[in-house]
Amino acid sequence: MEPIGAEERDAVRGLLGAVNEGLGAPMAPAWEAAFREVPRHAFLPETVWVGEDLVECSRDAAPGEWLRHAYADTAVVTQVNDGEAAAEPGERWASCSASAPSIVFRMLDTLDVRPGHRVLEIGTGTGWNAGLLAHRLGPGLVTTIEVDPVLAAQAVGRLERVGLDAEVIQGDGARGHAAGGPYERVIATCSVRAVPPAWIGQTRPGGVVLVPWESPWFCYGLLRLTVDGYGGASGFFSPHSAFMLMRGQRTDLRIYRDVVRDSHVPVESTTRLSPWAVAGDDWAAQFAVGLQLPDVWRTWHDDPDVEGVASRLWLATTDAASWAAVDWDGRSSGRFTVWEYGPRRLWGMVEAAYHWWRGAGCPGPERFGLTVAPDGTHVRWLDTPDNAVPVPPRPSAPDHEVPARCGTNTP
Ligand SMILES: C[S@@+](CC[C@H](N)C(=O)[O-])C[C@H]1O[C@@H](n2cnc3c(N)ncnc32)[C@H](O)[C@@H]1O
């Protein structure tokens, strides 16, 4: 193993302080030992991308800066564009990262591993998390799956170099890895919109499946399911878990570029509910709306060049069959113009979801939970599994095809 120099040791100490502060308490001694002895920098590639604009930082050109990023309590992007050439010059989006250390340790703590547990990780990425688990549990107990062959090979090399024994499987993590199980713990480090049944099927009764969950409404939560032994699993959400979506569950955002077509005649109305209330900075409201509308996507268009409109909230179903737009003038109350098109009146559904949440006393994410039934059905609930969150039924099929060209009759 590469020896850890004085500079790195100082950096580890500094990060440990920041992580403990982020966690609100010192991390468990066994995790602290793993943290010190499985150095994060040894798992990072020579080039990483940092900040909101994903600025490239290379170890060769800027060793001090590179090391600073390695030991900051932030995510460091380690692959862009799935490792392929950008579709448009300069286009960059994160396809792999070393997650922020405080999130890593919060998840490991929530996972609650015990000596002898077999653990399956989905999303090997750099291999750091698998290395921490292997340090804690010892050889032969950690299996990790990575879909990207280049990343998987790099992780194998890094784990070997630091002398840790975790089996890296290259493939689609949605299938799990039955040969390494059954597992006491399954942890995903990429987020999902639906829990793959294999993860539950390969976990022992009473075992835990920990997954970052998201909805297209940008509701994030960490879901901790306990496996019931009858093919199902159930558990609560907790906040703090924005991860990149698992390949296989990504939505191609290009379908929304063309969702509004010349021929569409939207229904116009007004609303007293500010779009900011449901898609602004109220995390709990957004989480509750996202849980109730699992196939509704939204985005803000700031400054749309329409008189009196500061921002326009766009909504669309993930099959691009229905859409809505709501204009926001920057005020929290008043009347706001709404356009809706398609078989589902999306703004009406959002209003109903929001009012249900208000009527329930504005519960935060930690009061919600989810049950996965043996047939794979997902039931979202509030406080107890018998108190289901209302999820409006979807029409059986879209009423028109996903458009192939760009429309111009935006409101
Ligand atoms: C946030 S990174 C994981 C960080 C990682 N645990 C670490 O310690 O560096 C998410 C990873 O999930 C991987 N991934 C995405 N979809 C996957 C899938 N279907 N199966 C396995 N891995 C997947 C990505 O390629 C990426 O490397």
Image (cartoon, rainbow, N blue to C red):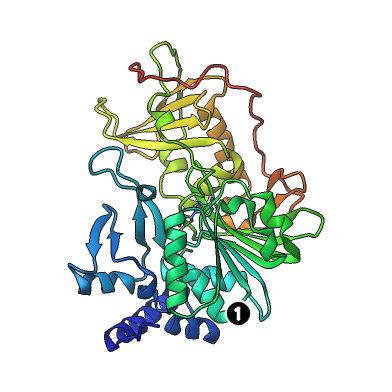
Q: Residue at x 51, y 50 (%)?
A: 246
Question: As rendered, which of 394 and 196 lies closer to the eye?
Answer: 196
Report whether 312 appears left or right of 174.
left
Q: Residues within 10 Å of mark 1 (few under 14, many from 20)?
A: many
Q: Residue at x 23, y 62 (%)?
A: 57
In this rendering, the count of numbered labels is 1
Query: Does the rendering let one see residue 125?
Result: no
Rendering coords of residue 29 (x, y %): 53, 87
Q: Quadrant of residue 398?
A: top right
Please provide percent x and percent y for residue 60.
20, 69
The N terminus is located in which quarter? bottom left
Image coordinates of residue 145 in percent, x first then y, are 55, 59
Q: What residue type is disc 1 on?
A: Leu
Res 98 seen here: yes
Q: Residue at x 58, y 58 (%)?
A: 211
Q: Secondary structure at mark 1?
A: helix
Name the quarter where the C terminus is drawn. Answer: top left
